[in-house]
Image (spheres, rainbow, N blue to C red):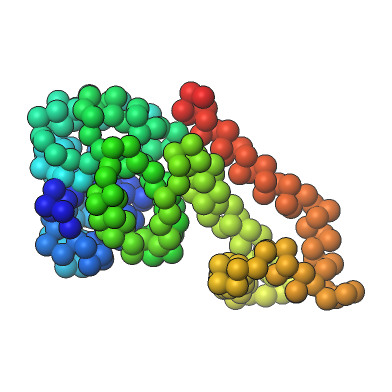
């Protein structure tokens, strides 16, 4: 880990910030790293620090200003509408703190805008993670402004325990977030609906949820590991005059695929609204 990354800060320790902190703490690249954690509700930062210490990490709760002053890598885990208020507090500290890299995960906020708010031409890494990163099964898109290859490579090594990492151009990151960032919520709804169908057919609720979640997990792995088009995998399950094709027919009658597409587009358009585009 570069010397400047020896101390890593997380300003904002909500669901996503906590998930990434846990992932980073598991990385081999985090050996000897200190984690400084701050949050608007201080008790949340204290709780996360305790969890990381229990996992063997050197972690403590601090103020926003301390994280900004002492850390070489600073994750900004606050909502887009809170960024201006946060930077009004930490920008003066950043301007005098030397070599650091900012990491933003705020939807619709560009790397250039983060630099403007910081008032420093510092390296900025923009990521779009999703909540399954908490269990090492996440998807994290990465783009950057002013970050060299060494910084990006070490950053990726730090977050590798979070799941699949992929660099993409910044002009595609909002679309990517609408698919993989918002997608888990859509998939949870699908799992719940599958389970409800099973309950309607007589399955106990716990069994129905387990079977539905297992089916989704297995289907996702088939897509990733087989390299086959999802449509081809669907066709392999739908025997002529069989049961599955009747279910597919019912989904099509309900506008299932159109509804899924519209959900992604709606999420993307909202991101553009947040960005003022």
| Image height of 91 relative to 7, above or below | above
Res 101 → quadrant = top left
In this orientation, which residue lies closer to the viewer: 217 or 166? 166
Judge from the rendering whether residue 3 lies leftward or rightward of residue 217; answer left or right: left
Q: Single out the residue that lies furthest toward the front.
A: 149
**Residue 106: x %, y % from top left:** 38, 38
Closest to the observer: 114 or 242? Answer: 114
Could you say which quadrant of the image residue 78 lies in?
top left
- Is residue 61 or residue 207 the one in the foreground? 61
What's the residue at 32%, 42% (across, down)? Answer: 125
Along the line of sight, which residue is nearer the eye, 117 or 198? 117
* Residue displayed at 22% across by 24% down: 119
Q: Quadrant of the N terminus?
A: bottom left
Relative horizontal placement of residue 203, taking residue 161 as reference (left or right): right
Q: Taking the image as drawn, is residue 44 in sight? A: no
The residue at 35%/27% (across/down) is 113
What number of labels is visible? 0
Q: Residue at x 11, y 35 (%)?
A: 98
Residue 241 spot, x, y in % from top left: 90, 74
In percent of width and height, residue 154 lies at: 25, 56
Most extreme residue toward the right, as rendered? Answer: 241
Q: Is residue 267 above or below residue 243?
A: above
Q: Is residue 73 left or right of residue 182?
A: left
Dividing the picture into quadrants, the one containing residue 56 is bottom left
């Amino acid at each position: 880990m570069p010397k400047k990354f020896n101390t890593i800060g997380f300003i904002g320790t909500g669901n996503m910030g906590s998930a990434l902190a846990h992932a980073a703490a598991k990385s081999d690249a985090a050996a000897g790293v200190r984690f400084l954690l701050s949050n608007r509700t201080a008790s949340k930062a204290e709780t996360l620090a305790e969890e990381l210490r229990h996992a063997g990490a050197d972690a403590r709760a601090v103020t926003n200003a301390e994280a900004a002053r002492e850390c070489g890598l600073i994750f900004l885990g606050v909502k887009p509408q809170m960024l201006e208020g946060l930077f009004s507090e930490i920008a003066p500290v950043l301007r005098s703190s030397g070599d650091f890299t900012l990491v933003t995960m705020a939807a619709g906020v560009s790397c250039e805008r983060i630099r403007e708010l910081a008032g420093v031409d510092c390296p900025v890494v923009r990521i779009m993670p999703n909540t399954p990163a908490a269990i090492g099964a996440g998807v994290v898109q990465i783009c950057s402004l002013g970050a060299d290859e060494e910084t990006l490579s070490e950053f990726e090594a730090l977050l590798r325990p979070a799941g699949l990492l992929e660099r993409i151009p910044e002009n595609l990151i909002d679309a990517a977030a609408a698919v993989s960032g918002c997608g888990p919520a859509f998939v949870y709804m699908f799992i719940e609906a599958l389970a409800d169908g099973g309950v309607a057919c007589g399955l106990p609720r716990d069994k129905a949820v387990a079977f539905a979640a297992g089916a989704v997990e297995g289907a996702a792995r088939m897509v990733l590991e087989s390299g086959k088009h999802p449509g081809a995998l669907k066709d392999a399950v739908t025997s002529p005059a069989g049961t599955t094709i009747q279910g597919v027919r019912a989904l099509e009658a309900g506008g299932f695929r159109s509804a899924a597409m519209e959900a992604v587009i709606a999420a993307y358009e909202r991101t553009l609204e947040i960005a003022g585009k």
